[in-house]
Image: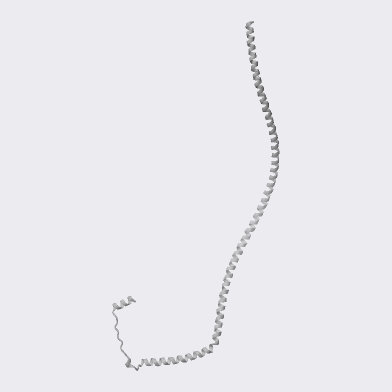
């Protein structure tokens, strides 16, 4: 019985120790449970915040989807308008190309016309100068025609003087052919230079 009692006491001590350990573990678990509860509350608050944020995000997504649809519609409208403007622009470019070709043709004809105009103006200037010269010649001829009788008289007078002079020249030539003043003659003496002297004179000249 003593041994049994000692065994039971040992077992009781073990149970007391186990109970103490269990109480310690219980308090520890209780603390962990409180922490888990607090963490759970925090997580629940976070979940609630996430739900609210999700709801707000869903509303934002709906608004963004509606905005996207509006933008898609506007984009389609802009695309259609762009296509229309593109076709109109192609037509305008074709029209502009035709207008540029017409302008080039008109410019070439205009430049040719300007060149011809300048040539005609130059011809007109030349003709005007010729007309002015002819007018001056006409005036001179009119003046000269007015002095023709005087010129005829002058020609007759000059012809008579010329006849007199010719007669005098003829008389003087006959006198030179038959000189009468032989006493006034004198002999001219001269010598031809040598060839060397002539070469020197040529070089000096």
Residue 179 position within the rendered picture, expressed as x and y whole percent measured from the top left: 35, 93
Q: Is residue 138 left or right of residue 194?
A: right
The C terminus appears in which quarter of the rendering?
bottom left
The outermost residue toward the bottom is 180
Residue 92 position within the rendered picture, expressed as x and y whole percent measured from the top left: 65, 56
Residue 173 position within the rendered picture, expressed as x and y whole percent measured from the top left: 39, 91
Rendered view: 29 above or below 174:
above
Q: Which residue corresponds to the image point at 33% horizontal and 76% vertical from the top-left?
A: 204
Q: Which residue corresponds to the image point at 56% horizontal and 83% vertical from the top-left?
A: 139
Q: Which residue corresponds to the image point at 63% horizontal and 5% vertical from the top-left?
A: 2
Rendered view: 50 above or below 177:
above
Q: Is residue 186 left or right of residue 103?
A: left
The outermost residue toward the top is 1
Q: Which residue is at the front of the view, 18 or 139?
A: 18
Residue 71 position within the rendered picture, expressed as x and y whole percent measured from the top left: 69, 45
Q: Which residue corresponds to the image point at 49% horizontal and 91% vertical from the top-left?
A: 157
Corner quadrant of residue 20:
top right
Q: Which residue is at the front of the view, 171 or 95?
A: 171
């Amino acid at each position: 019985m003593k041994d049994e009692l000692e065994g039971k006491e040992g077992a009781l001590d073990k149970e007391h120790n186990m109970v103490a350990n269990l109480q310690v573990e219980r308090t520890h678990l209780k603390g962990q449970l409180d922490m888990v509860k607090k963490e759970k509350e925090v997580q629940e608050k976070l979940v609630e915040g996430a739900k609210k944020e999700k709801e707000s995000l869903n509303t934002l997504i709906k608004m963004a989807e509606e905005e996207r649809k509006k933008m898609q519609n506007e984009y389609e409208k802009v695309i259609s308008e762009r296509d229309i403007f593109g076709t109109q622009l192609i037509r305008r470019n074709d029209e502009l190309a035709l207008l540029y070709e017409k302008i080039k043709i008109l410019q070439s004809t205009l430049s040719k016309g300007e060149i011809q105009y300048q040539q005609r103006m130059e011809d007109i200037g030349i003709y005007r100068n010729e007309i002015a010269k002819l007018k001056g010649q006409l005036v001179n001829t009119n003046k000269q025609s007015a002095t023709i009788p005087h010129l005829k008289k002058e020609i007759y007078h000059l012809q008579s003087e010329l006849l007199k002079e010719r007669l005098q020249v003829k008389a003087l030539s006959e006198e030179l052919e038959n000189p009468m003043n032989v006493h006034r003659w004198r002999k001219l003496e001269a010598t031809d230079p040598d060839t060397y002297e002539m070469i020197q004179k040529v070089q000096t000249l």
